[in-house]
Amino acid sequence: MVEFDHWRILIDPTFDPPGRRYPFALGTSSVKTRGPALQPHELGRVDLILVSHDHHADNLDRAGRALLPRATHVLTTASGARRLNAANTQGLTTGQTIALTMDGKPRLNITATPCRHGPPLSRAIVGDVIGFAIRGEGAADVALWVTGDTVLCRAVLRTARNLDVDVAIVNAGGVGFPLTGPLKYTMTGVDAVRLITELAPRVALAAHYDGWSHFRDGEEGMRHAVDGAPASTRALIRWLPDGEPVDI
């Protein structure tokens, strides 16, 4: 949960307990190994839910899906919005910007940023994914960039070089499956550190790197990469404690 400009924003909600195996594409699957730090009833008000993609359970599981009607706004991919088919849900394509309003809150401008959730030419298999660049009303810089699930590709690096970002949430984990060998479907820790170095945000937060069996690089890979990063990059990165509020 992120609080910004009086907006309460939930990102890729997953609240199922651990232990279940979830199917993915081409016969691949993953087991959830860690449960949520908070339960849905502990979240309080939810104004906006950002779903980078709706078709993988590590970004939207059953309990997370049940939360969607609680939010005033839900943003996801255009194809995901068609699948979810709810009045509070809008879909975005890469590069598209939408302005969201709520009574008593400043407007948010949210732009869908590019993702490639796998090797080249894999979109037909892995589906559509987007990130989110959030700007406050009248602001040129990006208050929050959520990379979404993506490998480190040219489009993502180009986006990083063109954004002025306060806080970046960078998804890592090095997702892979035995059936697809060495192919990667998200950034590793090394990739995430390279992206953070290129982006140079005011603060970078590593995310989406633990809690599932298909995260091959995992927390160990993320921490090892950060430990080996240049001092200037390490100074940007904050580790967040699970379930505890932190001011940034």
Image: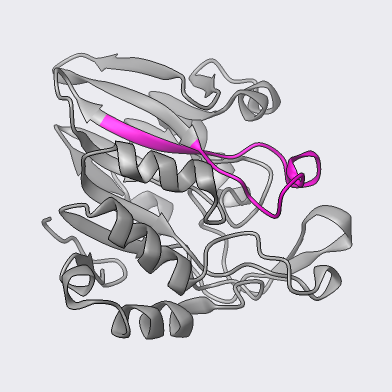
Between residues 79 and 41, which one lies in front from this camera angle? 79
Q: Quarter-wise, where is residue 222 in the image?
A: bottom left
| Apparent side of residue 83 relative to residue 105 in the rendered image (left or right) | right
Tell me the colour scheme of the image: one colour
Place of residue 201 in the rendered image (x, y in percent of width and height, measured from the top left): 21, 52
Place of residue 224 in the rendered image (x, y in percent of width and height, measured from the top left): 39, 85
Q: Quarter-wise, where is residue 200 in the image?
A: bottom left
In the image, residue 127 lies in the stretch drawn in magenta = yes
Relative vertical location of residue 78 with respect to residue 181 in this rendering, above or below: above
Q: Is residue 37 visible?
A: no
| Apparent side of residue 91 relative to residue 121 in the rendered image (left or right) | left
Where are the magenta residues, as a range?
Answer: 114-134
Residue sitting at x 66%, y 36%:
128
Count the labels in the image. Answer: 0
Q: Quarter-wise, where is residue 82 in the image?
A: top right
In the image, residue 141 lies in the stretch drawn in magenta = no
Image quadrant containing the C terminus: bottom left
Task: Find the residue positioned furthest to the right.
Answer: 27
| Apparent side of residue 190 relative to residue 79 in the rendered image (left or right) | left
Place of residue 32 in the rendered image (x, y in percent of width and height, measured from the top left): 62, 70
Residue sitting at x 52%, y 63%:
187
